[in-house]
Amino acid sequence: MFDLEEQIRSWRAMVADKLANRRQVIDELESHLREQFERLVHEGRGEEQAWNEVLQRLGTSEQLAVEFHKKQSPRWLAAWCAAAGLVLFAILLGGMASRLLFVRRDPLLAAHVFAVSLGYAAVFAVGFLSLWATIGRASGRWDASKDAALRAAGARLVLLAAAATGAGIALGMWWAHRHIGRWWAWDPRELGGLAVLGWSVLLLRSFRAGAAATQLLVLLGLTGNLVVAVSSFGPMLIQSGRSYGVSTIGMVLGAFIVSQMIAIYIELSRSVSLDVPVARLR
Amino acid sequence: MYNACMELSKDLVAASAGPLILSILQRGESYGYAIVQRVRELSGGQIEWTDGMLYPVLHRLEAQGAITSRWETAPTGRKRKYYAIKAAGRKALVKQKGQWLLVHGTLANLWS
Protein backbone atom coordinates (compact mmCIF):
# COMPACT_ATOMS: atom_id res chain seq x y z
CA MET A 1 0.00 0.00 0.00
CA PHE A 2 1.47 3.33 -1.07
CA ASP A 3 2.01 5.79 1.77
CA LEU A 4 2.81 9.32 0.61
CA GLU A 5 3.87 10.54 4.04
CA GLU A 6 6.29 7.65 4.42
CA GLN A 7 7.74 8.35 0.94
CA ILE A 8 8.14 12.05 1.78
CA ARG A 9 9.90 11.17 5.05
CA SER A 10 12.42 8.91 3.30
CA TRP A 11 12.92 11.49 0.54
CA ARG A 12 13.63 14.19 3.16
CA ALA A 13 16.12 11.93 4.91
CA MET A 14 17.85 11.26 1.60
CA VAL A 15 18.21 14.90 0.51
CA ALA A 16 18.95 16.31 3.99
CA ASP A 17 22.57 15.28 3.88
CA LYS A 18 23.14 16.40 0.30
CA LEU A 19 21.50 19.77 0.90
CA ALA A 20 23.37 20.29 4.15
CA ASN A 21 20.11 20.17 6.14
CA ARG A 22 18.88 23.45 4.70
CA ARG A 23 15.40 23.06 6.09
CA GLN A 24 13.68 25.90 4.26
CA VAL A 25 14.98 24.64 0.91
CA ILE A 26 13.82 21.11 1.67
CA ASP A 27 10.41 22.41 2.84
CA GLU A 28 10.02 24.32 -0.40
CA LEU A 29 10.94 21.29 -2.49
CA GLU A 30 8.54 19.13 -0.48
CA SER A 31 5.74 21.58 -1.11
CA HIS A 32 6.54 21.32 -4.84
CA LEU A 33 6.58 17.52 -4.71
CA ARG A 34 3.18 17.41 -3.07
CA GLU A 35 1.57 19.78 -5.60
CA GLN A 36 3.04 17.91 -8.54
CA PHE A 37 1.97 14.56 -7.04
CA GLU A 38 -1.60 15.75 -6.54
CA ARG A 39 -1.78 17.04 -10.08
CA LEU A 40 -0.55 13.78 -11.60
CA VAL A 41 -2.93 11.72 -9.49
CA HIS A 42 -5.73 14.07 -10.50
CA GLU A 43 -4.79 13.46 -14.13
CA GLY A 44 -5.28 9.74 -13.57
CA ARG A 45 -1.83 8.31 -12.70
CA GLY A 46 -1.60 5.66 -10.03
CA GLU A 47 -0.06 6.93 -6.78
CA GLU A 48 3.17 4.98 -7.12
CA GLN A 49 3.62 5.93 -10.76
CA ALA A 50 2.89 9.58 -9.93
CA TRP A 51 5.43 9.56 -7.11
CA ASN A 52 8.16 8.08 -9.34
CA GLU A 53 7.42 10.63 -12.03
CA VAL A 54 7.51 13.48 -9.53
CA LEU A 55 10.91 12.37 -8.22
CA GLN A 56 12.24 12.03 -11.74
CA ARG A 57 11.13 15.57 -12.61
CA LEU A 58 12.67 16.98 -9.48
CA GLY A 59 16.05 15.40 -10.14
CA THR A 60 18.24 13.25 -7.93
CA SER A 61 19.57 14.54 -4.62
CA GLU A 62 23.04 14.69 -6.24
CA GLN A 63 21.74 16.86 -9.09
CA LEU A 64 19.97 19.13 -6.62
CA ALA A 65 23.12 19.44 -4.53
CA VAL A 66 25.18 20.41 -7.59
CA GLU A 67 22.67 23.08 -8.63
CA PHE A 68 22.39 24.53 -5.12
CA HIS A 69 26.15 24.46 -4.76
CA LYS A 70 26.38 26.64 -7.89
CA LYS A 71 24.08 29.06 -6.14
CA GLN A 72 26.12 29.22 -2.95
CA SER A 73 29.18 30.57 -4.77
CA PRO A 74 30.74 32.66 -2.00
CA ARG A 75 33.68 30.30 -1.63
CA TRP A 76 36.01 32.15 -3.93
CA LEU A 77 39.59 32.05 -2.77
CA ALA A 78 40.28 35.59 -3.96
CA ALA A 79 37.46 36.99 -1.81
CA TRP A 80 38.81 35.25 1.28
CA CYS A 81 42.35 36.50 0.52
CA ALA A 82 41.06 40.06 0.08
CA ALA A 83 39.10 39.88 3.34
CA ALA A 84 42.03 38.38 5.27
CA GLY A 85 44.43 40.99 3.85
CA LEU A 86 42.08 43.80 4.77
CA VAL A 87 41.61 42.53 8.34
CA LEU A 88 45.39 42.19 8.77
CA PHE A 89 45.90 45.70 7.42
CA ALA A 90 43.23 47.06 9.76
CA ILE A 91 45.02 45.46 12.74
CA LEU A 92 48.37 46.99 11.74
CA LEU A 93 46.63 50.30 11.10
CA GLY A 94 44.98 50.09 14.52
CA GLY A 95 48.45 49.77 16.07
CA MET A 96 49.66 52.84 14.20
CA ALA A 97 46.56 54.85 15.06
CA SER A 98 46.84 53.92 18.73
CA ARG A 99 50.35 55.41 18.80
CA LEU A 100 48.93 58.66 17.46
CA LEU A 101 46.25 58.42 20.10
CA PHE A 102 48.41 57.66 23.12
CA VAL A 103 51.76 59.24 22.21
CA ARG A 104 50.61 62.37 20.41
CA ARG A 105 47.28 62.46 22.24
CA ASP A 106 45.49 63.37 19.04
CA PRO A 107 42.35 61.19 18.71
CA LEU A 108 41.04 63.16 15.74
CA LEU A 109 44.21 62.60 13.72
CA ALA A 110 44.29 58.93 14.77
CA ALA A 111 40.70 58.41 13.62
CA HIS A 112 41.35 60.30 10.36
CA VAL A 113 44.43 58.22 9.49
CA PHE A 114 42.66 54.97 10.38
CA ALA A 115 39.51 55.73 8.37
CA VAL A 116 41.22 57.12 5.26
CA SER A 117 43.79 54.30 5.12
CA LEU A 118 41.09 51.66 5.58
CA GLY A 119 39.02 53.26 2.81
CA TYR A 120 42.00 53.29 0.43
CA ALA A 121 42.82 49.68 1.33
CA ALA A 122 39.22 48.62 0.60
CA VAL A 123 39.48 50.13 -2.90
CA PHE A 124 42.73 48.22 -3.35
CA ALA A 125 40.94 45.06 -2.21
CA VAL A 126 38.32 45.57 -4.96
CA GLY A 127 41.19 46.13 -7.39
CA PHE A 128 42.80 42.90 -6.21
CA LEU A 129 39.59 40.98 -6.87
CA SER A 130 39.35 42.61 -10.30
CA LEU A 131 42.93 41.61 -11.09
CA TRP A 132 42.19 38.03 -10.02
CA ALA A 133 39.05 38.07 -12.16
CA THR A 134 41.02 39.36 -15.16
CA ILE A 135 43.51 36.50 -14.85
CA GLY A 136 40.72 33.96 -14.32
CA ARG A 137 38.71 35.27 -17.26
CA ALA A 138 41.74 35.38 -19.55
CA SER A 139 42.74 31.82 -18.67
CA GLY A 140 39.21 30.46 -19.10
CA ARG A 141 38.76 29.66 -15.40
CA TRP A 142 35.73 31.83 -14.86
CA ASP A 143 32.17 30.75 -14.27
CA ALA A 144 28.85 32.06 -12.97
CA SER A 145 29.66 31.19 -9.35
CA LYS A 146 32.89 33.23 -9.40
CA ASP A 147 31.01 36.03 -11.12
CA ALA A 148 28.44 36.06 -8.31
CA ALA A 149 31.21 35.95 -5.71
CA LEU A 150 32.99 38.91 -7.32
CA ARG A 151 29.76 40.92 -7.21
CA ALA A 152 28.92 39.94 -3.64
CA ALA A 153 32.40 40.60 -2.22
CA GLY A 154 32.85 43.74 -4.35
CA ALA A 155 29.53 45.21 -3.21
CA ARG A 156 30.57 44.89 0.46
CA LEU A 157 34.07 46.20 -0.07
CA VAL A 158 33.01 49.28 -2.04
CA LEU A 159 30.51 50.15 0.66
CA LEU A 160 33.31 50.01 3.22
CA ALA A 161 35.59 52.01 0.89
CA ALA A 162 33.09 54.83 0.38
CA ALA A 163 32.03 55.00 4.03
CA ALA A 164 35.57 54.89 5.48
CA THR A 165 37.06 57.33 2.96
CA GLY A 166 34.14 59.75 3.38
CA ALA A 167 34.40 59.59 7.18
CA GLY A 168 38.18 59.94 7.00
CA ILE A 169 37.97 63.06 4.84
CA ALA A 170 35.40 64.62 7.16
CA LEU A 171 37.60 63.87 10.20
CA GLY A 172 40.62 65.30 8.38
CA MET A 173 38.75 68.51 7.60
CA TRP A 174 37.73 68.80 11.22
CA TRP A 175 41.32 68.24 12.34
CA ALA A 176 42.60 70.85 9.86
CA HIS A 177 40.04 73.36 11.08
CA ARG A 178 41.07 72.87 14.70
CA HIS A 179 44.84 72.76 14.20
CA ILE A 180 45.55 74.85 11.11
CA GLY A 181 42.50 77.08 11.08
CA ARG A 182 41.08 76.02 7.69
CA TRP A 183 38.78 73.24 6.49
CA TRP A 184 40.08 72.61 3.00
CA ALA A 185 43.05 73.90 0.98
CA TRP A 186 43.09 71.78 -2.22
CA ASP A 187 46.51 70.37 -1.37
CA PRO A 188 47.70 67.15 -3.10
CA ARG A 189 46.65 64.85 -0.25
CA GLU A 190 43.19 66.40 -0.04
CA LEU A 191 42.79 66.10 -3.79
CA GLY A 192 43.92 62.48 -3.56
CA GLY A 193 41.33 61.82 -0.87
CA LEU A 194 38.65 63.44 -2.98
CA ALA A 195 39.63 61.33 -6.01
CA VAL A 196 39.45 58.10 -3.98
CA LEU A 197 36.11 59.10 -2.47
CA GLY A 198 34.74 59.93 -5.93
CA TRP A 199 35.96 56.62 -7.34
CA SER A 200 34.53 54.72 -4.35
CA VAL A 201 31.13 56.25 -5.04
CA LEU A 202 31.40 55.24 -8.72
CA LEU A 203 32.33 51.71 -7.69
CA LEU A 204 29.49 51.66 -5.20
CA ARG A 205 27.03 52.71 -7.88
CA SER A 206 28.30 50.08 -10.32
CA PHE A 207 28.64 47.13 -7.95
CA ARG A 208 25.26 47.77 -6.37
CA ALA A 209 23.48 48.26 -9.72
CA GLY A 210 21.51 45.15 -10.64
CA ALA A 211 22.80 44.33 -14.08
CA ALA A 212 26.20 45.94 -14.63
CA ALA A 213 28.36 43.82 -16.95
CA THR A 214 31.24 41.95 -15.35
CA GLN A 215 33.73 43.54 -17.72
CA LEU A 216 32.69 47.02 -16.60
CA LEU A 217 33.07 46.08 -12.92
CA VAL A 218 36.50 44.57 -13.49
CA LEU A 219 37.71 47.60 -15.46
CA LEU A 220 36.44 50.01 -12.80
CA GLY A 221 38.10 47.90 -10.10
CA LEU A 222 41.44 47.90 -11.91
CA THR A 223 41.23 51.64 -12.51
CA GLY A 224 40.50 52.02 -8.78
CA ASN A 225 43.98 50.57 -8.15
CA LEU A 226 45.48 53.37 -10.26
CA VAL A 227 43.40 56.06 -8.56
CA VAL A 228 44.41 54.95 -5.05
CA ALA A 229 48.07 54.38 -5.97
CA VAL A 230 48.43 57.85 -7.49
CA SER A 231 46.40 59.47 -4.70
CA SER A 232 48.48 57.83 -1.94
CA PHE A 233 51.97 57.96 -3.39
CA GLY A 234 51.64 60.90 -5.80
CA PRO A 235 51.71 63.52 -3.01
CA MET A 236 54.90 61.93 -1.60
CA LEU A 237 56.59 62.31 -4.99
CA ILE A 238 55.46 65.91 -5.31
CA GLN A 239 56.70 66.73 -1.81
CA SER A 240 60.10 65.10 -2.39
CA GLY A 241 60.59 67.30 -5.46
CA ARG A 242 63.19 66.60 -8.13
CA SER A 243 66.35 65.22 -6.51
CA TYR A 244 68.14 63.91 -9.64
CA GLY A 245 68.52 60.64 -7.77
CA VAL A 246 66.59 57.42 -8.26
CA SER A 247 63.19 57.55 -6.51
CA THR A 248 62.30 54.14 -5.08
CA ILE A 249 58.70 55.18 -4.49
CA GLY A 250 58.51 56.48 -8.04
CA MET A 251 59.92 53.24 -9.40
CA VAL A 252 57.46 51.05 -7.46
CA LEU A 253 54.56 53.33 -8.36
CA GLY A 254 55.58 53.31 -12.04
CA ALA A 255 55.84 49.50 -12.09
CA PHE A 256 52.45 49.19 -10.38
CA ILE A 257 50.80 51.58 -12.83
CA VAL A 258 52.22 49.67 -15.81
CA SER A 259 51.07 46.32 -14.34
CA GLN A 260 47.52 47.63 -13.92
CA MET A 261 47.52 49.05 -17.43
CA ILE A 262 48.53 45.64 -18.77
CA ALA A 263 45.65 44.07 -16.83
CA ILE A 264 43.25 46.69 -18.22
CA TYR A 265 44.53 45.97 -21.73
CA ILE A 266 43.97 42.21 -21.22
CA GLU A 267 40.45 42.81 -19.96
CA LEU A 268 39.67 45.22 -22.82
CA SER A 269 40.91 42.62 -25.30
CA ARG A 270 38.08 40.31 -24.33
CA SER A 271 35.23 40.50 -26.78
CA VAL A 272 32.18 42.00 -25.16
CA SER A 273 29.60 39.23 -25.17
CA LEU A 274 25.90 39.66 -24.68
CA ASP A 275 25.69 36.65 -22.45
CA VAL A 276 27.55 38.28 -19.59
CA PRO A 277 24.71 40.17 -17.95
CA VAL A 278 22.29 37.41 -18.92
CA ALA A 279 24.50 34.82 -17.23
CA ARG A 280 24.41 36.89 -14.08
CA LEU A 281 20.76 36.08 -13.66
CA ARG A 282 21.24 32.34 -13.84
CA MET B 1 17.02 22.08 -17.04
CA TYR B 2 14.62 21.24 -19.85
CA ASN B 3 13.38 17.87 -20.97
CA ALA B 4 13.01 19.65 -24.23
CA CYS B 5 10.80 18.51 -27.03
CA MET B 6 12.86 20.94 -29.07
CA GLU B 7 16.41 20.46 -27.80
CA LEU B 8 17.80 23.69 -26.35
CA SER B 9 21.50 24.12 -25.73
CA LYS B 10 22.71 24.18 -22.13
CA ASP B 11 23.85 27.80 -22.50
CA LEU B 12 20.50 28.91 -23.86
CA VAL B 13 18.70 27.08 -21.08
CA ALA B 14 20.82 28.77 -18.40
CA ALA B 15 20.63 32.19 -20.03
CA SER B 16 16.85 32.13 -20.49
CA ALA B 17 15.88 30.89 -17.01
CA GLY B 18 16.43 34.26 -15.30
CA PRO B 19 14.51 36.39 -17.82
CA LEU B 20 11.67 33.85 -17.92
CA ILE B 21 11.28 33.84 -14.15
CA LEU B 22 11.56 37.62 -13.87
CA SER B 23 9.01 38.10 -16.67
CA ILE B 24 6.54 35.80 -14.94
CA LEU B 25 7.04 37.52 -11.58
CA GLN B 26 6.62 40.92 -13.19
CA ARG B 27 2.99 40.00 -13.77
CA GLY B 28 2.48 39.16 -10.11
CA GLU B 29 3.93 37.12 -7.29
CA SER B 30 4.07 33.40 -7.70
CA TYR B 31 5.62 30.22 -6.31
CA GLY B 32 7.89 27.54 -7.73
CA TYR B 33 5.36 24.99 -8.86
CA ALA B 34 3.17 27.64 -10.51
CA ILE B 35 6.18 29.14 -12.30
CA VAL B 36 7.11 25.75 -13.79
CA GLN B 37 3.50 25.25 -14.94
CA ARG B 38 3.37 28.74 -16.42
CA VAL B 39 6.53 28.22 -18.44
CA ARG B 40 5.21 24.90 -19.70
CA GLU B 41 1.90 26.50 -20.62
CA LEU B 42 3.41 29.56 -22.32
CA SER B 43 5.77 27.45 -24.40
CA GLY B 44 2.93 25.16 -25.46
CA GLY B 45 4.61 22.31 -23.59
CA GLN B 46 7.85 22.75 -25.55
CA ILE B 47 9.87 23.94 -22.57
CA GLU B 48 9.76 21.60 -19.61
CA TRP B 49 12.12 22.39 -16.77
CA THR B 50 13.50 19.70 -14.55
CA ASP B 51 11.57 20.97 -11.56
CA GLY B 52 14.39 20.81 -9.04
CA MET B 53 16.56 23.07 -11.17
CA LEU B 54 14.16 26.01 -10.88
CA TYR B 55 14.75 26.53 -7.16
CA PRO B 56 18.49 27.19 -7.26
CA VAL B 57 17.80 29.84 -9.92
CA LEU B 58 15.09 31.42 -7.76
CA HIS B 59 17.43 31.44 -4.78
CA ARG B 60 20.22 32.94 -6.86
CA LEU B 61 17.93 35.74 -8.04
CA GLU B 62 16.91 36.36 -4.45
CA ALA B 63 20.53 36.48 -3.29
CA GLN B 64 21.23 39.02 -6.03
CA GLY B 65 18.40 41.23 -4.79
CA ALA B 66 16.30 40.85 -7.96
CA ILE B 67 13.39 39.14 -6.17
CA THR B 68 12.11 38.68 -2.65
CA SER B 69 10.22 35.83 -0.99
CA ARG B 70 7.79 35.10 1.84
CA TRP B 71 6.16 31.97 3.20
CA GLU B 72 2.40 31.87 3.18
CA THR B 73 -0.15 29.25 4.12
CA ALA B 74 -2.53 28.50 1.25
CA PRO B 75 -6.29 28.08 1.91
CA THR B 76 -5.69 24.31 1.68
CA GLY B 77 -3.39 24.60 4.69
CA ARG B 78 -0.24 23.99 2.65
CA LYS B 79 2.74 26.30 3.12
CA ARG B 80 4.09 27.89 -0.02
CA LYS B 81 7.03 30.15 -0.64
CA TYR B 82 5.90 33.08 -2.78
CA TYR B 83 8.33 35.14 -4.82
CA ALA B 84 7.90 38.75 -5.96
CA ILE B 85 10.03 40.91 -8.21
CA LYS B 86 11.92 43.86 -6.71
CA ALA B 87 12.94 47.17 -8.31
CA ALA B 88 16.43 45.83 -9.09
CA GLY B 89 14.82 42.81 -10.79
CA ARG B 90 12.58 45.03 -12.92
CA LYS B 91 15.60 47.08 -13.92
CA ALA B 92 17.59 43.98 -14.79
CA LEU B 93 14.65 42.64 -16.79
CA VAL B 94 14.42 45.82 -18.89
CA LYS B 95 18.06 45.36 -19.83
CA GLN B 96 17.63 41.64 -20.49
CA LYS B 97 14.59 42.31 -22.64
CA GLY B 98 16.55 44.77 -24.78
CA GLN B 99 19.30 42.21 -25.27
CA TRP B 100 17.00 39.33 -26.13
CA LEU B 101 15.00 41.50 -28.56
CA LEU B 102 18.22 42.68 -30.17
CA VAL B 103 19.38 39.11 -30.74
CA HIS B 104 15.93 38.06 -31.89
CA GLY B 105 15.62 41.01 -34.28
CA THR B 106 19.07 40.42 -35.75
CA LEU B 107 18.46 36.73 -36.33
CA ALA B 108 14.99 37.43 -37.76
CA ASN B 109 16.51 39.87 -40.24
CA LEU B 110 19.11 37.34 -41.26
CA TRP B 111 16.65 34.50 -41.64
CA SER B 112 13.80 36.39 -43.31
Image (spheres, helix red, strand yellow):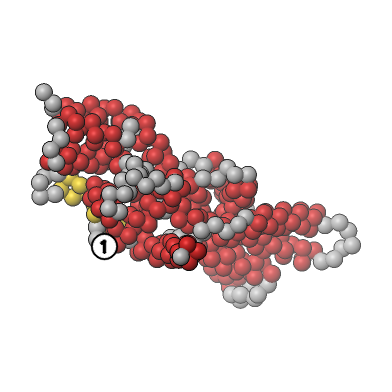
Question: Percent x, y for residue A43?
Answer: 14, 41
The residue positioned farthest toward the front in the image shown: B112
Question: Which residue is label 1 attached to?
Answer: B27
Give the residue at x 77% y 66%: A238
Q: What's the chain of the residue with tag 1?
A: B
Residue B81 visible in image: no
- The image quadrant where one finds the N terminus of chain B is top left
Give the residue at x 26% y 62%: B27
Q: Is residue A46 above or below residue A229?
A: above
Pick whichever, A130 or A39, lies toward us. A39
Question: Percent x, y for residue A158?
Answer: 51, 58
Q: Is residue A211 above or below residue A129?
A: below
Kindly indicate the quadrant of the structure image that contains residue B88. bottom left
Pick whichever, A42 or A1, lies toward us. A42
Horizontal side of residue A243 vs B14, given as left or right? right
Residue A191 visible in image: yes
The residue positioned farthest toward the top in the image shown: A1
Horizontal side of residue A183 vs B77, given as left or right? right
Give the total of numbered labels: 1
